[in-house]
Amino acid sequence: MQDLREAISPRRAAELQRQLMDFRRREENFQGQLREMQEREQDLQRQLREFQERDQNSAEFQQREENSQRELGEMRQRERNLQSQLRELQERKQNSQRHLTEFQHREENSQRELREIKQRERNLQSKLRQLQEREENSQRHPTEFQQREANSQRQLTETRQLTEFQQREQNSQTQLSETRQQLINCQEQVAELQLSLSTAQLTEFQQREENSQRQLSETRRQLINCQEQVAELQLSLSTAQLTINQLRSQETRDWVIPRDEIQITEKCLGRGGWGSVNEGTYCGCTVAVKEIYELILSPHNIPLFEREMNVASKCRHPQLVQFIGATNDEGSPLIVTELMEKSLRTLLEQRQLSETEIAIISLDVARALNYLHQKKPGPIIHRDVSSAKVLLWRQGDQWRGKVSDHGSAYVIQQTMTLAPGAMIYNAPEAFTSNQTVKVDVYSFGVLLCEMCNRELPDPRRREEQVVLVTNGVFRGLVRRCLQRDPGARPTMQEVIDKLEDANVSS
């Protein structure tokens, strides 16, 4: 049997070596494809920048269009002014015509009066002849002659009045001639203005308007072309990004563990509303196996679970519980991690911690959270910091802490209703869309207060529990972490500096 094992081991090693080489070749291929997609993405970004520069040029075209529109408005204003002047001249023309009509009426009246006077003159001449005839007979009748002479004097006075009326008529004729001349002048000015507007200025206006319309059409055409190019670039960028995401997804799914390689024992390490944790074995090592038996494997939750496992597989820190892998089949997900001795909550239920233990464990938790918050390209928010999520291990005679569930807490929150025990650590903004790493800082302050008082957090007695913290450094740190304004809370690096300045060492 020993000889058989010795004979099999080299073949098994060779097979494993071939599998390792195949995996490395596949990894190199994926890396090559990823580099090609990144280069393509850079080309697309360069094209996008070029388009943005062209977009700036289109802004210049838009400025030119605005200038053309402004000039068009100025020309239209000039046209309106000319129209206004034309209306004023037309009004003056109408007034002159009205005056002319009045003069014509007066002239007609004067002609009528003149005819009447001429008729009266003829009558007077007839009477004068009669008087002359009577004068010849006056020598025979002197008294009658004197009477007729008086009548002649009276008629002579009437003749002088007629002369004055004729003079007035001549003045009226003179005024009428002047008015007619003014009317003729106004008509000539109107004709000149209309001719000027209809020739030079109107031609210039139409020419400039045509140029403006032509520039506007050209600018709009260029803008449409730019928009089409933007749409094409965005489509190419989306396609490239999708391909990159697919390659990255294929590349980073090395955390998948076949379900049949995990053996779960009946020893239960913990149970909650999301599932249970049992002791198990994987590759001959004792591990902790978390089964999220109520996770709804919907099309939305499967990519979410895979994304969080990808993140967890890349997190490596001494104060984080080591993530080993997870299943990714149709069954309830199994998450495999290193096995710890107990949780911080279990230890607090057993006894009160010393200030040294509080300082060391809280510093371990702060370093773990700071690592998550400093992760690139974006920070990782734990969202479920509590005494149940801090697991302990022995280093000599001292308990040390590690933060667990940094890869599954977000999945559980998105697919289930949280157990009431987790809500007592939540920041005021925990159930809003405005979440930052400061939600973990708030939960850390609640956890530090719990470690000092050995009491489960109670949001209704928050201030009372803070007052019960006897250590001044811890109490001040708790108050800073529990600020309602996230911006007023310290960062985890500032928390670490504060604990280290208080001569706390690991």
Image (spheres, helix red, strand yellow):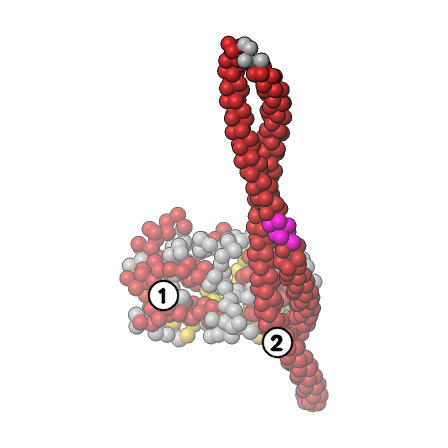
Local packing at callout 2 (Cα closer than 10 Å; few below 14, some 14-19, many 20+) is few
What's the mark number on residue 358? 1
Task: Give the residue displayed 52% in from the left and 64% down from the top.
Answer: 405
Q: Does residue 98 show up?
A: no
Name the amino acid, label 2.
Arg
Which secondary structure type mostly characterizes the magenta part of the structure?
A: helix
Membership of 460 in magenta stretch: no
| Residue mark closest to the camera, 1 vs 2 | 2
- In the image, residue 139 sits, relative to residue 440, either above or below, namely above
Secondary structure category for the residue under label 1: helix
- Residue 484: x percent and y percent? 39, 54
- In the image, residue 372 sits, relative to residue 134, either above or below, namely below
- Residue 206: x percent and y percent? 66, 59
Name the amino acid, label 1.
Ile
494 sits left or right of 200 in the view = left
Distance, label 1 to label 2, CA atoms, is 53 Å
Task: Give the residue displayed 34% in from the left and 74% down from the top.
Answer: 505
What's the mark number on residue 46? 2
Secondary structure category for the residue under label 2: helix
Q: Which is more toward the observer, 182 or 393?
A: 182
- Residue 472: x percent and y percent? 28, 62
Q: Which is more toward the observer, 392 or 468?
A: 468
Q: Are marks 1 and 2 in contact (CB under 8 Å)?
A: no
- In the image, residue 430 sits, relative to residue 359, either above or below, namely above
Q: Which is more toward the observer, 492 or 100?
A: 100
State which quadrant residue 414 falls in. Answer: bottom right
Q: Does residue 134 show up?
A: yes
Task: Give the residue displayed 32% in from the left and 65% down from the top.
Answer: 355
**Count of marks, rendered view:** 2
Q: Which residues are magenta?
A: 188-195
